[in-house]
Amino acid sequence: MPRRRPERARPRSRARPAARRETKPTEAERRLLDLARELSARPGADVSGALGLLAAAHAPDAPLPRAMAQAWIRGREDKTAALALAWAREQVRLALEEILAQAPHRSALSPSVETRAWLLLAAAESIAHEPEAAAADRLRALLDLA
């Protein structure tokens, strides 16, 4: 029988962990997280003040809508950036949800607090696409929805 060669110990190349790149938060993330902090710092059931703050942050001439649009475009190529932006936006929604949960429900809408917070955030974000003169009317509509 032919004799087998002893297997030599081969040096194994260790798989290197993927290099983590340190990402700085975008301007949009910073602004969204600041907005979430401001909303969280508001007194419990101050829905009108919270919606005023939200509407002002998303006004057509405010810096947040432009920063969000730029971050969203960049995020189309970078999943990590897209997730970071979505997480920051979710913090705003959660802060709004906390305020709505503490306030008496007076709207004709009867969805859950989570759904109302999502609807109000989406409506506030749409203010950026309206003429500046319409911002006051849109804020009144937000207050009616709350």
Image (cartoon, grey):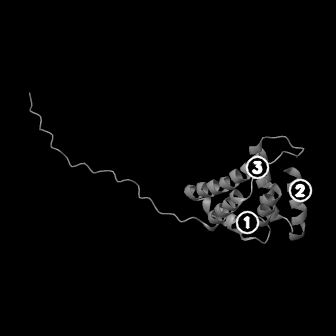
Nearest to N terminus: mark 1 or mark 2:
1
Q: Position of residue 63 (x, y in %)?
A: 72, 71
Residue at the spot x=64%, y=61% of the render?
A: 33
> Separation of disc 1 and disc 2 at Cα?
20 Å
Label 2 – label 3 distance at C-alpha: 14 Å
Which of labels 1 and 2 is toward the front? Answer: 2
Dividing the picture into quadrants, the one containing residue 87 is: bottom right
Q: Which residue is mark 3?
A: 117
Q: Which residue is mark 1?
A: 65
Closer to the camera, 10 or 102?
102
Left or right of 8 in this view: 106: right
Position of the N terminus, as image quadrant, is top left
Mark toward the start of the polypeptide (2 vs 3): 3
Asked if residue 100 is positioned above or below residue 74 in the image, the reply reads above
* Disc 1 element: helix
- For label 2, the residue is 141
Residue drawn at x 77%, y 64% is: 58
Amino acid residing under circle 2: Ala
Mark-to-mark CA distance, 1 and 3: 19 Å
Q: Quadrant of residue 108?
A: top right
- Counting from the top left corner in percent of width and height, residue 106 is at 88, 46
Identity of the amino acid at label 1? Pro
